[in-house]
Image: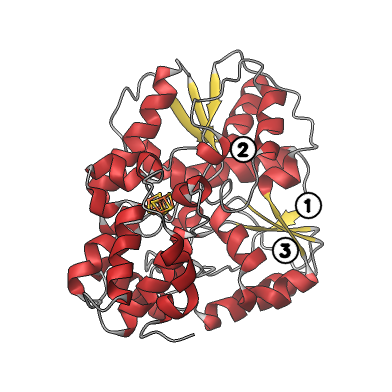
Amino acid sequence: MKGKYDFERRFREQILQCSRCGFCQAVCPVYGATLRPALNARGKILLLKEVMDGKIELSDELIETLFQCTTCASCEVNCPSGVNVPEIIKQARKDMVNIGSCHPAFKGMNEVLQRHTNIYGEDEAEDFDREKKEKAEVVFFVGCVGLYREDEATEATLDLLDRLGVDYTLVDEVCCSGVLEDVGYKINEDLVKRNTETILSIDAKKLVTECPYCWRTFTSVPQYDELRRNIEILHITQFLKDFDFGVKTEKLVTYHDPCDLGRHCGIYEEPREIIKKIAPNFVEMPHNRENSLCCGAGGGVRGAYPKNSLAMARRRLQEALDMGADVLLTECNSCVHNLSQVKLRKDRIRIYNTTQFINELMEEME
Ligand code: SF4
Ligand code: SF4
């Protein structure tokens, strides 16, 4: 198909299908934070149509519109015309990078991952005082956020696996590098190779991760083909859903569906099955499952547009507070991290990964 840019060659029909109905405006977290119609899904698609029509060129002037998207997919699931906005945005970002136009934060992320093995450019990963075994039933893959920013949450998850008697090992993991695909660059094949070789060297039956983004990358990106051909890859909620934890809480608990686990991977029920075992007083927020509100951390927005990212997190946290919840659970270290940055009635609500919360309940019972 003809076209100057790849986004046009790949998505021309979808862009033309946009009827400008505006259904996406109400659900776009970036619009919610900025109230700027140019930044919602419709605004982005209209802009790309103008590029296709030759009225404007891709240039630095489009950076703010095209790079300010959490790739949350709320627009996609609510679009009556079947426009896959996040995939179109991701391709347009690649086209922007190809012509040398990129948000500096995204450019920086790519540079860091060409030189370091994690998105923070840190030298040393936490080892959590766990022996790295040569053989185990399960390889537990932490992910960058859990290794370098939410290490308390990771420690608690590992404690829970210990309490449940799981035969697991940590490995010398490196960033899955899937995020590069979201911010306009290509996945780092060297990092893919290192992860694949390291994980498969353990000869484990299962690869389990708590990070929805790593899970999504391992299970869907073509470069990880060899990995998924040779090991079963599970999100921790899929792995833990049949365990009996033997603890309960009377607290009012609610659950935030991470975009990457929910809308992108369709994992809605396993986290709820686990939570309902331990929290009889579970309440859903009005925006749940497919309609969950984005926490604002994804698509590189937390790094590039921190103020707007926090505004999105505030809106999500407010919904949990409005339910009167004592505890907000989720299944993603990025969500925990972003939601925890909001200074909003912190005394009223605790924010955890579900594993961290279950571990705390088990610890209290001992
Ligand atoms: S919901 Fe879909 S068709 Fe409607 S304006 Fe948004 S992208 Fe276009
Ligand atoms: S993916 Fe999310 S942030 Fe991006 S345009 Fe769609 S609704 Fe807005």
For the residues labelled 1 and 3, the Cα–Cα distance comes to 10 Å
Label disc, if present, on residue 167 of the rendered structure: 1
Mark 1 vs mark 3: give the one in front. 1
Indicate which disc, 1 or 2, sits on the residue closer to the N terminus.
1
> Contact (CB < 8 A) between labels 1 and 3?
no
Query: What residue lies at 63% left-to-right and 30% top-to-bottom?
Result: 358
Extreme residue toward the left, this view: 61
Q: Which residue is mark 2?
A: 355
Q: Would you call the spot at circle 1 few (<14 residues within 10 Å), some (14-19), or many (20 or more)?
A: some
Which quadrant, please, contains the C terminus? top right
Whether 323 is drawn above or below 84: the answer is above
Please state the horizontal and vertical placement of residue 295, each as a whole percent of the image.
41, 42
Q: Residue at x 58, y 31 (%)?
A: 357
**Secondary structure state at the residue bearing disc 3:** loop
User: Residue at (52%, 44%) from the top-left corner?
Assistant: 258
Residue labelled with disc 3: 133
- Amino acid under disc 2: Thr
At which x and y percent is residue 169?
Answer: 70, 58
Going by the numbered disc 1, the residue's amino acid type is: Asp
Q: Are marks 1 and 2 in contact (CB under 8 Å)?
A: no
Horizontal side of 356 relative to 273 (left or right) equals: left
Residue 324 visible in rendering: yes
Residue drawn at point x = 49 percent, y = 25 percent: 286
Mark 1, ligand 2, within 8 Å: the answer is no
**Label 3 or label 2, whichever comes before in sequence order:** 3
Mark 1 to mark 2 CA distance (whole Å): 17 Å
Q: Secondary structure at mark 2?
A: helix
Distance from Cα at disc 3 to Cα at disc 2: 22 Å
Total labels: the figure holds: 3
